[in-house]
Image (spheres, rainbow, N blue to C red):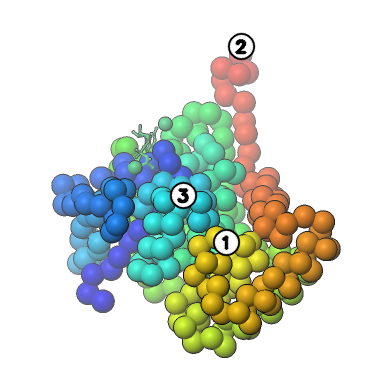
Amino acid sequence: RKELVVALAGNPNSGKTSLFNELTGSRQHVGNWPGVTVEKKEGRLKFEGIDFKVVDLPGTYSLGAYTEDEVIARNFIIYDKPDVVINVVDATNLERNLYLTMQLLEMNANLVIALNMSDEAKAKGIEIDKDKLSQILKVPVVMTVATKGEGVKELLENVLKAVEFKGERYRIDYGKELEEGISELESLIKEDEELSKKFFPRWLAIKFIENDENIMKEFSSKTALMEKVKLIQKKLEGIFGEDAEVVVADKRYGVISGIVKECVKKRSTPEERYT
Ligand code: GDP
Ligand code: K
Ligand code: MG
């Protein structure tokens, strides 16, 4: 591919559009996503002689199938397979923002994290050990202030490096029972040429267990697979005493809370100390 595609993904108000403007300047095109009235922003940029197309995805807290924005963002990542996804993370709200990060990792997106609003985080006394975060997630992490263009060059250098990345990123360990169900489904998915070509098998297996509305509808005709999904969901519900999707979400929140404890320190600000 001559032109590399970079998508910007992040929570609403994390600074995606500010970063998009900083990256692409006036070389922008605004249209709509096919079939919907949600705005689609694309822009271009050249860095170290390489042409990039940059796509500003709708801001979302999750990549479930619950809103139009979530479906647009996730379909772009699944079907258009951007070379790199810049996950714009609001450093003042790391815990909430990491919920999306975990889902992007689960989709096997080739991530670089822009730890944005780092000026506001600093002013609030929030210290994030970005090297530790990078080490845990196995993803490059760059501090940025999108509105001032700070960190943008370093971000692009890391995007360029990530294009060549072939290793493993962080993966949530969902625990023995869930992992058994996931790997059972993963095997079935890998045997199915249509599914394994389109989707990252582990991600799809987890979506089945989560009873994802769009995914369940799309594959309702694969009766043998769907029966297996129902069986695994039932078994997990028997073990945990609640819906499998709740168990998956709880596990994600737990993992994120642990990561935040390891990476974030909150100092008192001067105002808090002296007033
Ligand atoms: P989006 O919803 O993710 O597209 O976020 P925007 O780019 O629209 O930014 C949301 C708000 O945060 C705007 O008021 C921006 O000016 C501001 N903003 C974006 N990045 C930064 C940053 O790094 N530092 C600070 N202090 N403000 C920022
Ligand atoms: K703000
Ligand atoms: Mg925006």
Q: Earlier in the sequence, mark 1 or mark 3?
A: 3
Q: For the residue marked with disc 3, what is the amino acid?
A: Thr
Q: Quadrant of ligand 2?
A: top left
Q: Indicate whether 114 appears above or below 157.
A: above
Q: Earlier in the sequence, mark 1 or mark 2?
A: 1
Q: Which residue is mark 1?
A: 212
Q: Which mark is residue 124?
A: none
Q: Are marks 3 and 2 in contact (CB under 8 Å)?
A: no
Q: Position of residue 232 (x, y in %)?
A: 73, 71
Look at the numbered disc 3 and give the secondary structure of its residue.
Answer: loop
Image label count: 3
Is the CB–ligand 1 distance for label 2 below 8 Å?
Answer: no
In three-dimensional space, the C-alpha distance between marks 1 and 3, rounded to whole angstroms, equals 12 Å
At a point 82% along the width and 56% down the height, the residue shown is: 241
Q: Are marks 1 and 3 in contact (CB under 8 Å)?
A: no
Is the CB–ligand 1 distance for label 1 below 8 Å?
Answer: no
- Which is more toward the observer, 152 or 68? 68
Q: Are marks 1 and 2 in contact (CB under 8 Å)?
A: no
Q: For the residue marked with disc 2, what is the amino acid?
A: Thr
Is the CB–ligand 1 distance for label 3 below 8 Å?
Answer: no
At a point 61% along the width and 68% down the height, the residue shown is: 208
Q: Position of residue 113 (x, y in %)?
A: 46, 54
At a point 57% along the width and 88% down the height, the residue shown is: 191
The quadrant of the rendering that contains the C terminus is: top right
> Residue 182 occupies which quadrant of the picture?
bottom right
Q: Which residue is mark 3?
A: 67
Q: Residues within 10 Å of mark 3 (few under 14, many from 20)?
A: few
* 212 on left or right of 22: right
Q: Which mark is residue 275?
A: 2
The quadrant of the rendering that contains the N terminus is: bottom left
Q: Indicate whether 117 appears above or below 35.
A: above
